[in-house]
Image (tube, rainbow, N blue to C red):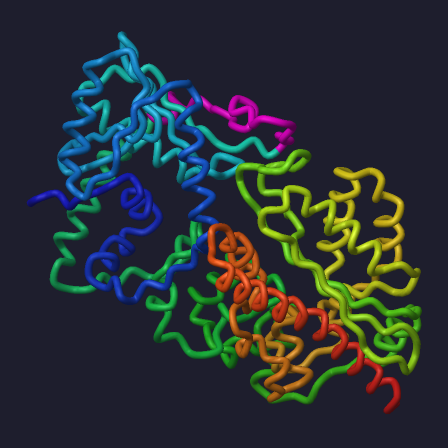
Amino acid sequence: MNNIYLSKSRYCKAVQCKKIIWLKKYKTECAIQKARDTVLENGTAVGQLAKGLFGKYENIEFNENLNIMIEQTKKLLANKPNIITEASFNYDNNFCSVDILKNDLDGVEIYEVKSSTEISDIYLDDVSYQYYILNSLGFNIKKASIVYINNKYVKRGELKLNKLFNIEDVTEIAKSKLQEIKNNISELNKYMEVHKDNEPKDDIGIKCFKPYECEFWEYCTRNLPKPNVFDIKGGMNLNKKFEKYYEGKVSFKDLQNENLNPKYLEQINFEINDLQPKIDKETIKDIMKTLKYPLYFLDYETYQVAIPEIDGTKPYQQLPFQYSLHFIKNEGAPIEHKEFLAEIDDKNFIKHFGEQLIKDIPDNGSVIIYNKAFEPARNREIAEMYPELKDELKRINSNMVDFLVPFKQRKYYTKEMQGSASIKCVLPALYPDDPELDYHNLPVVHNGGEASEAFLNLKGKSKEKQEEIRHGLLVYCKLDTYAMVKIWMKFKEIIDNN
């Protein structure tokens, strides 16, 4: 039996679920990639930057022909002591490229670089797989470590790599996993041999989501009834969902009489029985009573990068680059709109964001947002970076009213919301069949993740392309605040009709 080809990423996928490897070989077209471009770009940028962690290094360029990489590595290994990045090795068809290999006179040190801010079990599997290969090839491995991001680091001036990165020695763990890795590789090879002519019947489980959501989830659940236990929203624990699945309680009809949280039963009940909307008018009245003119409807767009580029920011800090503001000066006044979208090459865009926001919200009216956990936190971060803006941003924060609350608490609920309080579900539920309010009809950007990517993608684009992307960003963010205006109108309608 010939061993199947394994890389360190394929090995880690096999640790999560052996069937992933089978599906990648025989059903690649069924994969739905969930990782966003910015996530992948962060990983690439971190890997590139970390190469210089120990000073001068020699890099092995990627080549489709892995033997070329392996041969180049052998040549560089002879020139010890040195630092080799992407040093490549093969043992019994198990291949790995080591992110950073410290090649000393008396042995080697392995450094696996991650763009995460903490160490997870799968990272230990990753570095241990490399340890296994190099150990099998007869190397004296002095140390195996994981390099990851220190999210407490605040950039001040030049980047300090020794402060940006944490390094954790995991040598003993890697040693202890040698037999486990050997067994895992052997089991996977047997598994692939047994199933070379037939699809494995492995069941779904928590492994489909941990450590990563599997790209074959839709394929493996294609025969489940719709809606099913995995469509329950509102925070139902994944373990609980699988518990019901294993009990054979899968469809909403199976679940309607189960002992579940009333919130989950409510979603099931509404969808099975096509119930009419539930509206707690007193809650709506209470919210509307708190509002003071002028009314400001506000929404931010942000992006995150692993490597801080702006002084005063940390890795993965939410950096606000855009806002939309609909406002109504007094009762009966027309709806007006203002907006801010940073220039991609403006190094002070966060300050300019804060300054413009303060100008655009000069009065102490109600600032209506959707999710109190987000915009106020961004304002506090801006105030920390620019203390001269603190008092005004504090004033804006003190006037905030969260329109998410009645939907999250299910004081206003319809079956079309499908258990979700997201504005992307609430808006079409309140205003069905209104193309003006349909996020799917937007030209470029359709959600927050796409907004972050679109903004970052402005770099290096032609003037025409930049204008197209910027227009898409403005239209998207404008709809987010117009959605809140429409919710306010719906609240008004409910009270007026009472």
Q: Is residue 221 above or below residue 105?
A: below
Residue 463 location (% of width, % of height): 51, 59
Residue at the far left: name it.
1
Q: Which residues are magenta?
A: 152-174
Question: Residue at 51% across / 27% down in the picture?
Answer: 165
Q: Is residue 405 visible?
A: no
Quarter of the rendering occupied by the C terminus: bottom right
Question: Residue at 85% across / 55% down in the picture?
Answer: 396
In the picture, measured across the screen, residue 122 lies left or right of residue 292, that is left
Residue 130 location (% of width, % of height): 28, 30
In this view, the residue in front, 319 or 116, is: 319
Instruction: Check residue 165 for magenta coloring.
Output: yes
Residue 203 location (% of width, % of height): 33, 61
When asked about the image quadrant of residue 436, the answer is bottom right
Residue 287 location (% of width, % of height): 86, 71
When asked about the image quadrant of residue 5, the answer is top left
In the picture, measured across the screen, residue 92 lies left or right of residue 287, that is left
Q: Is residue 127 above or below residue 248?
A: above
In this view, the residue in front, 75 or 424, is: 75
